[in-house]
Image (cartoon, rainbow, N blue to C red):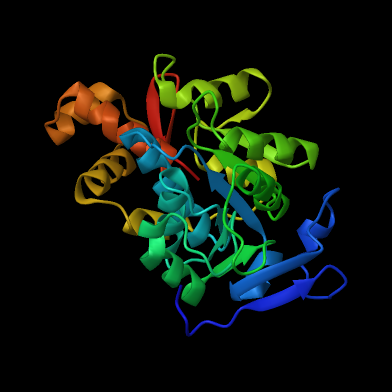
Amino acid sequence: MDETRKIGVVEFDSEDYPAQLRLIKDPPEKLYYIGDLQLASREAVSVVGSRKASPYGGWAAEEISRRLAASGLVVVSGMAAGIDSISHKGALAAGGATVAVLGCGIDICFPAFNRNLRNEIGKKGLLLSEYPPGVPGSRYTFPQRNRIISGLSLATVIVEAGVNSGSLITAERAVEQGRQVFALPGNINSFYSIGTNKLIQDGAYPLAFIDDIFDVLGLPKKDQQQRISGLGVEEQRMVEAVCQGGEVTVDSLCRTLGMKVWEVNSLLTILEMKGVVYSALGKIFIAN
């Protein structure tokens, strides 16, 4: 723990208690925190998933969190290994705000290797726990804190989840709380996507594009020009080619950019996920 950070306490009857959390059926009577408590009352989206992330899941968690944070939303997660940690880092990398809800006492760093991330969140964001200092994490405390993660959020995004992933508990709590649940589709032969694909089958919103979060929740997006300026060199080349053509095909992009079909399709998938382009009837357009 960063000893220079003061542990604060806020009780349910305080006007500083997070507004969204008041609305759930079983809110904590008391919250311990380090950092900026006001972040817990701002518009937020939680981004969670398995402790073992695939390269696809890691990329998606970081990109989703960057986009959310860049648009002024607070990213909430549980600081666990894998998707949670990547989500916090994505928000911080975008210069945004993030809240880590702990499943142990506010003074305990778990997992221990996340000490640097924990200290950074304590300085730039918010560490939050319903457990007083000294309480170790357990098989009970970690699932229990998931209701706080979803309770602070307008919506919860499940990036990856195995059959018994704790993030599925977060999705259940979000549904019980009347909050929107998004799930990232994945390969049907991937262990990492069994849980998310099942969530979609059960009614979760399939996150085909990151912009879906903003559209479904009715939230403003980051300006398109700012989004384009943050792209990589190859991504910007493709965007320029689409802009010049107005509406283009994969074949025409291959000829213009001197790239193979699979290379163009891979870049287009990333740009669609980032909300920069979209495709319809075999043609590619710049997104609004």
Q: Position of residue 125 (x, y in %)?
A: 53, 70
- Residue at (49, 26) in percent of width and height: 162
Residue displayed at 50% across by 45% down: 288
Q: Position of residue 59 (x, y in %)?
A: 35, 42
Q: Position of residue 224 (x, y in %)?
A: 45, 54
**Residue 256 vs residue 14, the one in the foreground:** 14
Residue nearer the viewer, 208 or 186: 186
**Residue 272 in which image quadrant:** top left
Q: Is residue 11 left or right of residue 222?
A: right
Q: Position of residue 281 (x, y in %)?
A: 45, 19
**Of 182 and 287, which appears nearest the observer?**
182
Q: Total number of numbered labels? A: 0
Q: Is residue 218 visible?
A: no
Residue farthest left in this picture: 258
Quadrant in the picture for residue 175 = top right
Q: Please give the name of the residue rendered at 69% of the width and 46% of the height, measured from the top-left corner.
A: 144
Q: Does residue 222 sit above or below 175 in this rendering? A: below
**Does residue 99 sit above or below 169 in this rendering?**
below
- Location of residue 120 with respect to 160 vertically, above or below: below
> Residue 180's image quarter?
top right
